[in-house]
Amino acid sequence: MKNKLVLLLFYLTLIFTLSAQPYSPFSRNVTDIHTVDSAYLCVYYAFNAINIHDESTYEDLQKLEIGNDLSKYYSYFLFIDDSLTTDWGKKHPHAATVPNHVGLKIKDPDTWSENHYSEYFKDFLHNQLTVYIQMPYPLGRVSSQYTEELPVQNWNISNDTLTVAGYLCQKATCSFRGRNYTAWFTMDIPVSNGPCKFGGLPGLILKVYDNDKLFTFECSKIENMSKKCAINKFNNFDKYKITERTNFLKFLKDVHENYYQMAQFIFPPGALIPKLKKYNLLELE
């Protein structure tokens, strides 16, 4: 009887843990960083927004920081949460644990996604892109990084126009790694860059989405920096496991299909295993 009670308590604890934090990473210390460049332009992108004018409808708010030598793209909502958590830790130095998601606005803060937990650094001097991916709990030990040549999208530019964030934009389309995309770029900002891995047009991409509308990045705000701001990188990124992009895609597929096994969760016989939310990979090939 005692063993059954212990097993039941273990199972209930596991279900509570998974329902509260099924597979998101731990928060990060935003002071454990170093500066790699300075940004002269910062662009904010709403990810999958229902209403571009209402941040509470965004799946995420992401930020592109553009410097002379490199650019950085990352989740700004996640940065806010990490900052608040870091501040909470300073105010409660004797706390046994620091809570995750102190003030995160993201709709599903406990749902891991490659797009949300990755940081993209485009190195213009070496024509390289390095992606650092913070893996879900408890797979942090295999948080990964990979470097590739700056991806090239073969855009077809048309004469169609659209106003995005107050800028007149021109339409371009392409196929990229298994998905078809439509982008809107502005010649008013002659910077060949954009959200995530996108770029290569004669102006800044302010909106881009795939044909299935699974991924939509739309500019919500642009900051021209009168005084450059630091572009920072977490110090522990150097400890992330180095891999190849194609190998990482295979690993991602395995994570999404066999998460509980990879995370080494053990369920009692006959237990109802919590379902994980379906996640679509950004790159299919």
Image (spheres, rainbow, N blue to C red):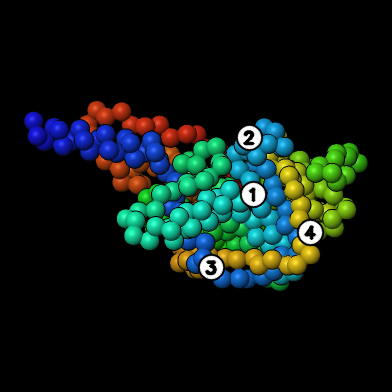
- Describe the element under mark 2 as helix, strand or loop: helix
Labels 1 and 4: the sequence-earlier one: 1
- Percent x, y for residue 89? 42, 58
- Percent x, y for residue 61? 63, 46
Residue type at numbered disc 3: Ile
Q: In percent of the image, x 77 and y 47: which residue is there?
A: 206
Depth order, front residue of 236/80: 80
Residue type at numbered disc 1: Gln
Q: Which residue is mark 1?
A: 62
- Describe the element under mark 3 as helix, strand or loop: strand
Labels 4 and 2: the sequence-earlier one: 2
Q: Quadrant of the N terminus?
A: top left
- Describe the element under mark 4 as helix, strand or loop: strand
Residue type at numbered disc 2: Thr
Residue 33, label in figure: 3
Labels 3 and 2: the sequence-earlier one: 3
Q: Which residue is mark 4?
A: 224
- Describe the element under mark 1 as helix, strand or loop: strand
Q: Is residue 257 left or right of residue 84?
A: left
Residue 57, label in figure: 2
Labels 3 and 1: the sequence-earlier one: 3
Labels 2 and 1: the sequence-earlier one: 2
Depth order, front residue of 140/61: 61
Q: How many marks?
A: 4
